[in-house]
Image: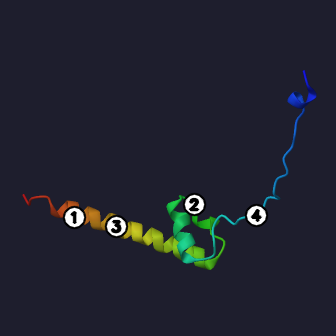
Amino acid sequence: MPTTMIARTTQPTQAPTFVAPYGDSERDGARMYNAGKRLDECQTDAQTRGWLAAEARGCDAYYRCMMADASDIEPL
């Protein structure tokens, strides 16, 4: 069997570069909340503000839905 068939050839690859998982803005904090990350995983104040704002929007939406469901019930 020729050696070229069994020889392992390595391809040159680019050096890996670090890419931060989340940026430094309130929008990134909201993305962290929507991805299910914990509040203590926020690294900056902007991320924390975004995370808390996204949580508040979720609570408001839940409350709005519950009130809409409650208003559909006929009074006894």
Residue 68's spot in the image, x, y percent?
Answer: 22, 64
Q: Nearer the viewer, mark 4 or mark 3?
A: 4
Residue type at tag 3: Ala
Sooner in the amino-acid sequence: mark 4 or mark 1 = 4
* Alpha-carbon span between mark 3 and mark 2: 20 Å
Element at label 1? helix
**Which amino acid lies under the numbered mark 1 shown in the image of this protein?**
Ala
Q: Secondary structure at mark 2?
A: loop
Give the image quarter of residue 61.
bottom left
Q: Mark 4 or mark 2: which comes first in sequence?
A: 4
Kind of residue indicated by mark 4: Phe
Disc 3 residue crowd, few under 14, some 14–19, many 20+, Cα 10 Å: few
Relative to 46, say whether 12 is above or below.
above
Q: Which mark is residue 21?
A: none
Tell which circle, 3 or 1, labels the residue nearer the N-terminal end. Answer: 3
Which label belongs to residue 61? 3
Task: Report how far apart the C-alphas of labels 1 and 2 lie in the structure.
Answer: 29 Å
Above or below residue 10? Residue 38 is below
Colour convention: rainbow
What mark, if any, has residue 37 been given in the picture?
2
Q: Is residue 53 left or right of residue 72?
A: right
**Closer to viewer: mark 4 or mark 1:** 4
The structure residue drawn at horizontal position 40% and vertical position 66%, both measured from the top left corner, is 58
Q: Position of residue 15 (x, y in %)?
A: 83, 59
Closer to the camera in the image, 74 or 4: 4
Q: Earlier in the sequence, mark 4 or mark 3?
A: 4
Disc number for residue 18: 4
Quadrant placement of the C terminus? bottom left
Q: What's the distance in space between the residues labelled 3 and 1, CA to CA?
A: 11 Å
